[in-house]
Amino acid sequence: MRCARRSRRRVRYPRAMHTLLRLTPLLGVGCLALYDPCELDEGNLLGDSEFEALTCWFDGTDDGVWPFGGLDDSESSPGSGSPVFRAENVAQSETYAVQILQGGDRTSTRRAPLDLEPGDDVAITFLAKADPPRSIIVQLADDSTSSLFETQPIGGEWASYTVNGTIIGGDMDFVFLDIQLGGDPGVVYLDDVVLEVIE
């Protein structure tokens, strides 16, 4: 069964839908995009880009535990303020060992596909800081095709970063955004992550 694509317009759902979304896999419902509580701003293909609930994001295991990170109310970004996403890497030496993802990854039964097509030129912008400063990886890919794989240095103060790429193909139902935060020990903060198609 193929689910309908998620709209690019902003959609608001009641908070109760967040609970329903978490329970839906247990109920055996296939098209979970129909119950997607993520709010999309005009032009932004990501939900919960301001990190209000983490409902739209997953950590690669999709078990909802978030062993390395979560929402931080004590930190405020120069964009949407508080909360922000905070990831602490204690001992993982590989960047992919600490990651935050969104999209139609095969390990996730709860997320809708990103509304992307082959040939789309895209820009990913986000606010970030790191302690100590480090490099992270920003990737757009499916299981076999990487359309964007960018190493981005992150400084010790909040700043805006942008990476660009072109969707070169792959299975559009399973393309996901992957931000890899592992590597050296330290803390990375993220906020206001936007994925947009450049017309």
Image (cartoon, helix red, strand yellow):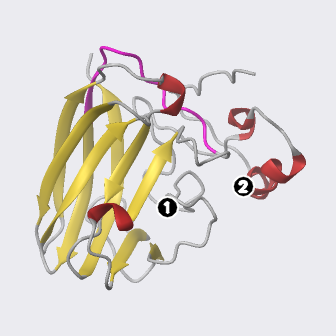
Q: Nearer the viewer, residue 189 or 58?
A: 58
Q: Secondary structure at mark 2?
A: helix
Mark 1 or mark 2: which comes first in sequence?
Answer: 2
Q: Position of residue 36 (x, y in %)?
A: 67, 41
Q: Nearer the viewer, mark 1 or mark 2?
A: 1
Q: Position of residue 170 (x, y in %)?
A: 41, 23
Q: Which residue is mark 2?
A: 18
Question: Relative to 82, is 2 on the left or the right?
Answer: right
Q: Please report the residue visible at 36 percent of the width from the left and 19 percent of the height from the top.
A: 169
The segment highlighted magenta reads 111-123
Q: Quadrant of residue 90?
A: bottom left
Determine if the magenta segment contains residue 118.
Answer: yes
The residue furthest front is: 144
State the mark number for residue 165: none
Question: Relative to 138, is 109 on the left or the right?
Answer: right
Q: Quadrant of residue 88?
A: bottom left
Q: Which residue is mark 1?
A: 59
Callout 1 touching callout 2 (CB < 8 Å): no
Q: Position of residue 25 (x, y in %)?
A: 79, 49
